[in-house]
Image (cartoon, rainbow, N blue to C red):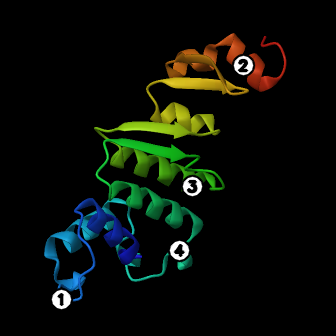
Amino acid sequence: MFENLRIGVLARHRIRFDVFRPISRMRRVNEETAEILSRVGLEARSRDLAGDLTYSEQRALEIGMTLTTGADIILLDEPTAGMSREETAQAVELIRAVTEGKTLLMVEHDMSVVFSLCDRVSVLVYGSILATDTPARISANREVQEAYLGEEAA
């Protein structure tokens, strides 16, 4: 799994494969890779294959791969889908930590996740924006309630 992340770090630094320059000797690349592994909480699994990780660990690895790009904007598509409540809580904390100081654009159907991570929320209905506002105002918005409850809000 270390290799999955190291490939991203190599790409960010535009380092190409060279048989005369072993990757294992690239101290800066290996240190950056180890730091990302630590940030996503996977340092203990660094030698494991990605396919041997649990589902939530695979999602953490995906977030780590995103971090290898060094991007200031992080795009996540349903990062907690299929997770238990405990895994979701851990994922939310991870996302909050790794996106600090960055812009997060996320598609997510679990509104507790959205409301806990986002400063602004846009609600889409049939591909059109119904409302954009703060989490508090979105949760109180009558049109949003009607669209997602399928009936008139009380």
Q: Quadrant of residue 102?
A: top left
CA gap, disc 1 and disc 4: 32 Å
If you read the primary sequence from the N terminus, does the residue marked by circle 3 or circle 1 appear first? 1
Q: Quadrant of the N terminus?
A: bottom left
Q: Is residue 74 left or right of residue 53?
A: left
- In percent of width and height, residue 8 lies at 34, 65
- In percent of width and height, residue 55 lies at 58, 66
> Crowdedness of circle 4 by 10 Å Cα count: few (<14), some, many (20+)?
some
CA gap, disc 2 and disc 3: 27 Å
CA gap, disc 2 and disc 1: 62 Å
If you read the primary sequence from the N terminus, does the residue marked by circle 2 or circle 1 appear first? 1
User: Which residue, given by chain and number where applicable, does mark 1 sit on?
Assistant: 20
> Crowdedness of circle 3 by 10 Å Cα count: few (<14), some, many (20+)?
few
- In percent of width and height, residue 80 lies at 58, 50
Q: Which mark is residue 145?
A: 2
Residue at x-position 56% and y-position 71%: 54
User: Which residue, given by chain and number where applicable, does mark 4 sit on?
Assistant: 53
Instruction: Check the image and report above or below for 24 versus 133.
Output: below
Q: Which mark is residue 94?
A: none
In this rendering, the label closer to the viewer, 1 or 4: 1
Q: Secondary structure at mark 3?
A: helix
In this rendering, the label closer to the viewer, 3 or 1: 1
If you read the primary sequence from the N terminus, does the residue marked by circle 1 or circle 4 appear first? 1
Residue at x-position 56% and y-position 46%: 77
Residue at x-position 15% and y-position 70%: 28
Q: Nearer the viewer, residue 21 or 154?
A: 21
If you read the primary sequence from the N terminus, does the residue marked by circle 2 or circle 3 appear first? 3
